[in-house]
Amino acid sequence: MKTLFCWSKISTVILSGFLCVLLVIGYVWLPLLQKYIRQYDPSISIWRQIDWLLIGNFLAMSILITLNAELRHDIPYGIIAIIGGFIIEAWGTQSGLWTYYTMETPPLWIIPAWPIASLSVWRLYHLLLHFIQKVPEKWFEWSYWPIFGVFFVLLLDFAAPTFSHPLNNIFYFGLRIININKQR
């Protein structure tokens, strides 16, 4: 990235596409949107009912996906994120690792979030590179394994309740293949 923050015509195209996706999701899943709006309780202040974290993340990602946009990079990256997101959502919801309140497996309305989040992380990575240029490389090499180790332990703890599910247990697949071959 040549400059830290750059807005271009492509940025406008990406923001317009993002807003169109939101409108399509709102239109196609209108009953879901209406159900969400009906949860509003007039006896409680509107400011206490708003999910500020969700709005903050939404605004931050909206800004991040538009800064330094390059269609040559962003379109393939977005396509890969949609495909990967669909596979991950299908695996996670069908294995019972997580569920959505619509009980869809996977919910199609969540799939567009994957390329948006992916591009946002890519932009944050490059933004972070700009600010940490003076940090020695050795520090990153040293800190990688402790950070990854903690992440891995937390991931195992998160996924442990579903280890017996066939989609989460690669050994289960291997044993099934061996048993099927023995039965023939």
Image (cartoon, rainbow, N blue to C red):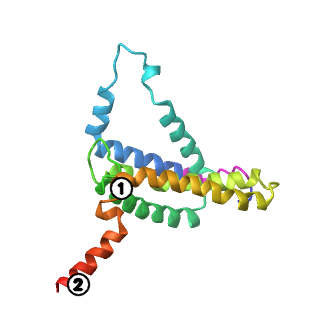
Residue 22 horizontal/vertical position (percent): 41, 45
- Where does the image place residue 164, in percent across and percent down from the top left? 31, 59
Instruction: Provide the secondary structure element on which disc 1 rests.
Output: helix
Please tell me which residue lies in front, 123 or 134: 134
Q: Nearer the viewer, residue 37 or 170?
A: 170
Taking the image as drawn, is residue 128 in sight? yes
**Is residue 48 located in the magenta-colored stretch of the structure?**
no
Crowdedness near tag 1: few (<14), some (14–19) or many (≥20) residues, C-alpha within 10 Å: some
Residue furthest left as drawn: 184
The residues tagged by marks 2 and 1 sit, at their Cα atoms, a distance apart of 29 Å
In which quadrant of the rendered image does the C terminus lie?
A: bottom left
Q: Is residue 10 visible?
A: no
Residue type for callout 1: Gly
Helix, strand or loop at mark 2: helix
Give the vertical position of 124 relative to 142 (above or below): above
Residue, disc 2: 181
Instruction: Check the picture and name the quadrant holding the N terminus.
Output: bottom right
